């Protein structure tokens, strides 16, 4: 009898913790500013109650999207190490969005070493979008 009662209680707790189905639509979220004034923006598409697509970009203080030019100075790569690190963050942004779209679970999104600011911005923007 104790085992049955325990199983019923455990099932109730687990179902209470289960994620609620999402309403279909497109949700937008924005992170807070980092130390340089940059921020992240996410767009999440929900279809059939599940995440079907996710896009994530980070923007510099002036609103410019961090893309293949991020890390260049006046359109030129003046410091290869800096540029490589900046581009690691750009690739990580795509990875974060892809992992989330595939799993629908923020806990399944792995942070990329060297791109943790973008990771934190991604998490914050997704949480805001789904609030």
Image (cartoon, grey):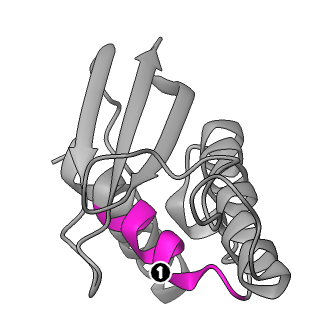
Residue 71 magenta: no
Residue 122 magenta: yes
- For label 1, the crowd category at 10 Å Cα-Cα, with few meaning under 14, some 14 to 19 and many 20 or more, is some
- Note whether residue 89 is visible: yes
Magenta stretch? 114-124
**Residue behind mark 1:** 117
**Residue 24 on image: x %, y %:** 33, 13
In the image, 56 versus 129, the foreground residue is: 56
**Residue 41 on image: x %, y %:** 34, 46
Q: Is residue 80 left or right of residue 93?
A: right
Secondary structure under the numbered disc 1 in the rendered image: helix
**Residue at point 23%, 73% (across, down):** 37
**Residue at point 66%, 68% (across, down):** 89
Q: Main secondary structure of the magenta part?
A: helix
In the image, 73 versus 33, the foreground residue is: 73
**Residue 101 on image: x %, y %:** 62, 37
Count of marks overlaid on the render: 1
In the image, 26 versus 89, the foreground residue is: 89
Q: Say which quarter of the image contains residue 105.
A: bottom right
**Residue 43 on image: x %, y %:** 38, 32
Q: Is residue 2 above or below residue 86?
A: below
**Residue at point 70%, 42% (across, down):** 98
- Note whether residue 130 is visible: no
**Residue at point 70%, 47% (across, down):** 68
Q: Is residue 2 above or below residue 12?
A: below
């Amino acid at each position: 009898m104790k085992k049955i009662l325990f199983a019923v209680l455990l099932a109730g707790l687990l179902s209470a913790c289960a994620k609620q189905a999402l309403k279909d639509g497109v949700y937008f979220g924005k992170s807070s500013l980092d130390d340089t004034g940059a921020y992240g923006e996410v767009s999440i598409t929900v279809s059939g109650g599940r995440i079907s697509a996710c896009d994530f970009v980070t923007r510099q203080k002036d609103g410019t999207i961090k893309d293949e030019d991020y890390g260049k100075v006046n359109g030129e790569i003046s410091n290869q190490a800096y540029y490589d690190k900046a581009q690691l963050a750009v690739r990580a942004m795509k990875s974060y969005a892809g992992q989330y779209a595939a799993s629908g679970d923020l806990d399944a999104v792995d942070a990329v070493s060297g791109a943790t600011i973008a990771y934190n911005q991604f998490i914050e923007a997704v949480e805001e979008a789904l609030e």
